[in-house]
Amino acid sequence: MSLAKSAKELARAAGGSHSTVDARTRIIMQLVNNLKFEQNIQIRNISQLKEKNIENWLRSGREKGLSPRTLQNRLTSVRAVLKAAERYDTISRLENTAKKVGFAGASRDGVRKPPSDQQINLMLSKVNHQGVRLCLEMMNEFGLRQKEAVMSAASLEKWLRDITNDRHGRFQLIQGSKGGRPREIWPNNPQYASALVSRAIEYARQNDGKLVAGDLKRALGKFNRESANAGFKGIHSPHSLRYAFAQRTISRVTEQGWDKRLALSFTSQVLGHGDGRGRWIEQVYSRS
């Protein structure tokens, strides 16, 4: 078996959501190509991979200007693959690699900032594609990821029934969720949520049951282009709308008397991160 094939298998064996596995596989193939074409290292199995080979690859990335966070992600992916290969000895020797290569202390702070309501409304007014605009509005109101918003058309009628029948306006999101894990969405304004989903249903009915035409890859490409043209880019990329939603949710439930830790835990669940990442939510999503 070739090194590339065995590396891909181990990247999948390390587990995680589809997007996590895809990212890990992409990163490990960057290492394989670096070994072959830059370091001229001829090995056929991960068991032959040495600590210095990994350090040289990371050092090369640093010299090319990759950010500390990107290098940290590379190292994390390699550790996951080594763990799947039961290379615990090598993992232990990599403990000080970040410091040796020069990217220790990479920040986990979010790279985006929530736009103000005024900024959101201004950018939304510049979106020419109505389906894309509806997706962005739902990201802002429900804390959806862009894939979840683009794929939401098939679920909209059920969402509307749930929002209407639940006194909190809660509904369950399944399609497009990260790792296929369903989660419960708690809108901050159930009445507005109902009106927004109704508008999305009407648009989808008139457009072959979709908010953005094409297969998922083409639809996401269209979504990203239209969003960027309207100003949703950089620190205010579409993903920043999840930050805005998170801050509104934290503010709403604390005003209702929840303590800060519980508010963060709740917001983490609504965003799809589970209830144990409240501290991370505060560090990443609560920054203004």
Image: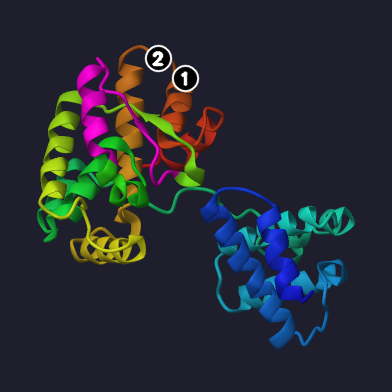
Q: Which residue lies furthest to the top in this view?
A: 257
SS at mark 2 in the image: loop
**Residue lying at 40% horizontally and 14% vertically, measured from the top left:** 258
Asked which quadrant contains residue 243, the reply is top left
Which residue is disc 1 drawn over? 262
Task: Judge by depth and name the residue closer to the eye, 201 or 243.
Answer: 201
Q: In the rendered structure, which segment of residues is drawn in magenta?
A: 155-177
Task: Judge by depth and name the residue closer to the eye, 269 or 64.
Answer: 269
**Residue lying at 18% horizontally and 61% vertically, measured from the top left:** 230
Give the amino acid at mark 1.
Answer: Leu
Which residue is disc 2 drawn over? 258
Q: In this view, does 42 lie to the left or right of 200?
A: right
SS at mark 1 in the image: helix
**Residue 159, magenta (yes or no):** yes
Q: Is residue 32 left or right of residue 270?
A: right
Residue 142 horizontal/vertical position (percent): 29, 36
